[in-house]
Image: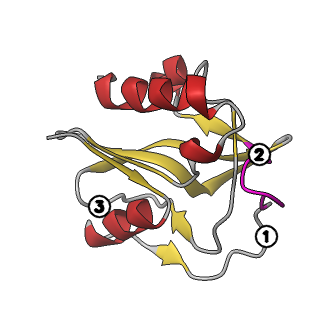
Amino acid sequence: TNVFSVCRASQSLWAYFGNKLEQHNDWHKQSTYKTEQCHELKFDPKYNNLSGYINKVNSRHHQVMLNSAEILGNLEVVAVAKEGKEVYTDIVEIWKHKNDKIWGVQFHPENHDYTDELCPKIIDQLLNNE
């Protein structure tokens, strides 16, 4: 079974596997409308192949999934938030389970301006990426 979780569902799974959330996010740029792509992603080098599908994302959340030295629950961080030259290594934007096809994204791919074309490609690339 494949699982693709978005925003709050992604946060819930992140916490379910034992990882931490920061309750109030007042330092990370937020979209002013749901389709605004307000920041970039910085991918772990082994997932750079995904950067061609997802460059900028929307951000409409007040909680963040916190990256740490020890990620629990057999999860790994795929991408963190990037705003200009500032890389927020502590803010997880995409994660995956190491053994199962379970992925989480903090942003809403269904709300991108180019949803009809790219959203299915993003989901397909994530779920089929080894």
Percent across and percent down for residue 84 are 86, 41
Q: Which amino acid lies under the numbered mark 3 shown in the image of this protein?
A: Leu
Q: Nearer the viewer, residue 122 or 99?
A: 122
The residue at 61%/18% (across/down) is: 52
Segment tinted magenta in the rendering:
30-39
Residue furthest bottom as drawn: 23
Q: Is the image coloured rainbow, by chain, by secondary structure, or in one colour?
A: secondary structure
Q: Secondary structure at mark 3?
A: loop
Q: Nearer the viewer, residue 105 or 98?
A: 105
Residue 46 horizontal side relative to residue 112, left or right? left
Q: Residues within 10 Å of mark 1 (few under 14, many from 20)?
A: few
Percent across and percent down for residue 22 are 56, 77
Q: Quadrant of residue 72?
A: bottom left
Task: Indicate which label's residue lies in the foreground, 1 or 2.
Answer: 2
Q: CA distance from mark 1 to mark 3?
A: 25 Å
Q: Are marks 3 and 2 in contact (CB under 8 Å)?
A: no
Q: Quadrant of residue 116?
A: top right
Residue 53 horizontal side relative to residue 3, left or right? right
Q: Are marks 1 and 2 in contact (CB under 8 Å)?
A: no
Give residue 39's mark: 2
Q: Nearer the viewer, residue 60 or 14?
A: 60
Q: Nearer the viewer, residue 90 or 129?
A: 129
